[in-house]
Amino acid sequence: MNPILIEQILQLLLGQFLTVKANDAANAPYIATIKAALAANQPIDQTTLDSLLAADDAADAALQSA
Amino acid sequence: MNPRIIVKVLLCVALAVVAGCTTPLPKPVNANGTVNASATVADLDLTYQDLDRLATAYVTQCHAASTTPGCSESIITGMKAASTKAKAALHAAHDALKQLPGVGSGIDKAIADLNAALAFLASYTAQIPASMKVK
């Protein structure tokens, strides 16, 4: 296999890993909040909802430009 | 050692690490069988982001090496269209939440539409080969 291709694939995987970790880190507080709200049948505050919607837009933008 | 074997081992390790990074969310139902609408929508926001993350990783891999087995432009096109549709449903659901507690907010229909849009998007991410899935 071409060494340059190998390097590109490894860089791609590393980039994806870091992106996933960044997403997990960004969503971690939301996941905890949502889990608690689901368990207690409590609402989510508007600020959190707005942040989640902004993250939705960012996720779609990343997909459309991929 | 054969470089091909080294690369395959590294790829397997990287995918295994990435695959183990997330924990599935609980279903949006509490002990009473009901759940707050905003919590439901928030849960679906995260579902959408998870699906888009899978789709983005797939498209990125395919565009980096288009001859990768399992890559399909028709799947990619469908994913992008389904994501756009689901995003519109998400915005509609968030708009409906803002109308609450108004009786005519349409939140139930908005959530139903959102679930359908996410299922449509999931029908594409389900076609991603297991070896290419990044959870």
Image (spheres, coloured by chain):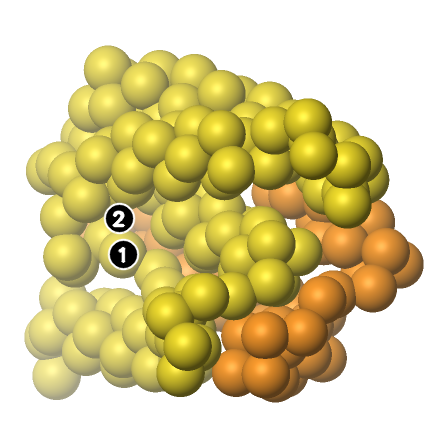
Residue at the spot 60% in from the left edge and 23% down from the top edge: B88
Residue A8 or residue B122, whichever sits in front: B122
What chain does badge 2 belong to? A
| Callout 2 secondary element | loop
Residue at the spot 26% in from the left edge and 48% down from the top edge: A2
Category of crowding for the residue at label 2, using alpha-carbon neighbours closer than 10 angstroms: few (below 14), some (14–19), many (at least 20): few
What chain does badge 1 belong to? B
- B69 lies left or right of B65: left
| Callout 1 secondary element | loop
Residue at the spot 68% in from the left edge and 27% down from the top edge: B104
Tell me, for residue B119, which label it has, or none. Answer: none
Image: A59 above or below B4: above
* Tag in front: 2 or 1: 1
The image position of residue B43, as x and y in percent, is: 54, 60
Image: B6 above or below B94: below
Tell me which corner region of the image, top left, top right, bottom left or bottom right, holds residue B10. bottom left
- B53 lies left or right of A41: left
The image position of residue B29, as x and y in percent, is: 40, 70
Amino acid marked by disc 1: Lys
Residue A20 or residue A32, whichever sits in front: A32
Residue B13 or residue A53, whichever sits in front: A53
Tell me, for residue B133, which label it has, or none. Answer: 1
Report how far apart the C-alphas of labels 2 and 1 lie in the structure.
Answer: 24 Å
In the current view of this chain or complex, which residue is farthest to the front?
Answer: B103
Amino acid marked by disc 2: Asn
- B94 lies left or right of B65: right
Residue B36 or residue B129, whichever sits in front: B36
The number of callouts visible is: 2
Image: B92 above or below B4: above
Q: What hue does chain B carry in this figure?
A: yellow
Q: What hue does chain A carry in this figure?
A: orange
Q: Disc 2 marks which residue?
A: A2
